[in-house]
Each structure stands twice: as C-alpha cells, then as structure tokens.
Image (cartoon, coloured by chain):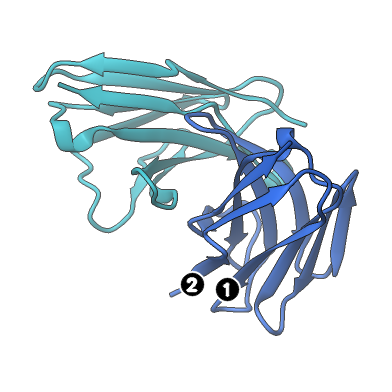
Chain colours: A cyan, B blue
Amino acid sequence: GAVVSQHPSWVICKSGTSVKIECRSLDFQATTMFWYRQFPKQSLMLMATSNEGSKATYEQGVEKDKFLINHASLTLSTLTVTSAHPEDSSFYICSANEMNTEAFFGQGTRLTVV
Amino acid sequence: KQEVTQIPAALSVPEGENLVLNCSFTDSAIYNLQWFRQDPGKGLTSLLLIQSSQREQTSGRLNASLDKSSGRSTLYIAASQPGDSATYLCAVSLNQAGTALIFGKGTTLSVSS
C-alpha cells in the first residue's frame, strides 16, 4: 500500500514553545491530507483538513491560530503547534487518501509539553 | 452527526480462538468503512477497506463484513495469535471520496499464549 511518513515520532518541548510536525506522502500525491489528535483512551478526532495550495479547514473547537497548517506541495503538509501548553500533549497523526479511496496514516507523533 | 461505536471495548482470549469485533454507525450514508490496527504508541495500519457497495472483504485470517442498511460491520479474526494483540479501530468515511474518517474508540484485544 501507499506510504505516509510522519516526523518526528515523539517530541518533548517546554511550555510556550512551538513544535512542527511533518507529514509526507512518499509514493503518491495528496492534494488533501488530514490531521487527527488522539487523547489517551479516546478515539481519533479530526482536527483539520489540509488542502494543497489553499487554507486549511478546521473542525469546530480547534484554534486555527494555535495549530498552523501548511500544505505547500502535493507531498508535504506540516502542523505547527504554537505556544504549546501541557493540555496540548497528545498523539497527533496525519493521513492521506490514495486515489481518493483508502486512507493511509503516518506513524503519529507523541507530543509532550512540560 | 455520524457516531461510531465499537463493542467490546476490551477482549482477552487464549491463542487459537476465533473472535468477532463489532462496529456500528448511526448514519448509513457512508462511502466506505475501514478497519485499522493500532499498536501501543504507534500509528495505524490499514487492515481492510470495504466500499459501501460491498458486503465483505477478506485478507488472510481477517474477514470484515458490512451491512450498510443496519449500520453494522464485524471484523472476524480466525485462529488468533499473540501477535494479534493490539487495538482495532473501525472508521467510516462520509458519503464522498477522499473525506476524513470518523473513528470508533476501538477494541483492545489481548491474545494469550
């Protein structure tokens, strides 16, 4: 199947700093990528839809100024958590759909804000 | 609003047993349904994808069925192995291609040797 690569796999940062997470589709082009967040023992929840060459679409309750998304090419989307706080600690994971059908996920990023 | 429910939340079985994981969704207007496996602290591995027009898909010891009209899907695992221990997630996509997924909370499976 298609491969989606996410980096880093884990990161620890100080409160108030920013963290950038990269999501790459390695063997296909993705005009749309999705960013999800998963808190412990909870389901994956969609945060935003990343659209190549245009602004991201955010789900209700997700602050667009805090979670900056850039989708500058057909194979790369980035999520930047700005001014991170301990409550932002979570598992962040991206996905892309090959041929608009099956969804493939990155490895996920475990963010811990201390 | 689409909601996905998975039952049971956790399941422990001895090696060799056949087992069934259940998934239900509230809105039958789905485009497709996917089953994923998630190991602790890891990403998602796609197991099976069922298009809305299909009734089932099989891959090795895994078989997934879909009854769209009743809003149900099952994942059947035959001859379970300790390596099958993981969390299994069911997710549906809304009624068009390339949309985001709505996930259930998952079933955490433990297979003992």
Q: Are marks 2 and 1 in contact (CB under 8 Å)?
A: yes
Specify the subunit that label 1 lies on: B
Residue A78 in sight here: no
Q: Which mark is residue B25?
A: 1
Residue at horizontal 14 percent and vertical 16 percent from the top: A14
From the viewer's perspective, is B64 left or right of B33? right
Quadrant of res A11: top left
Which quarter of the figure is the N terminus of chain A placed in?
Answer: top right
Q: Say few, some or many: other residues with alpha carbon within 10 Å of mark 1 (under 14 / 14 to 19 / 20 or more).
A: many
Residue B64 in sight here: yes
Q: Which mark is residue B2?
A: 2
Residue at horizontal 66 percent and vertical 67 percent from the top: B22
From the viewer's perspective, is A85 left or right of B45? left
Quadrant of res B54: bottom right
Q: Residue B29 in the image: state x and y as whole percent.
A: 62, 76
Residue at horizontal 25 percent and vertical 35 percent from the top: A67
Residue at horizontal 31 percent and vertical 19 percent from the top: A20
Vertical comparison of B82 with B26: above or below = above
State the separation of the CA atoms marked 2 and 1: 7 Å
Q: Residue A90 in the image: state x and y as whole percent.
A: 31, 35
Q: Amino acid at mark 1?
A: Phe
Q: Amino acid at mark 2?
A: Gln
Q: Say few, some or many: other residues with alpha carbon within 10 Å of mark 2 (under 14 / 14 to 19 / 20 or more).
A: some
Q: Residue B110 in the image: state x and y as whole percent.
A: 62, 44
Q: Tell which of B89 and B15 is nearer to you.
A: B15
Q: Secondary structure at mark 2?
A: loop
Outermost bottom residue: B70
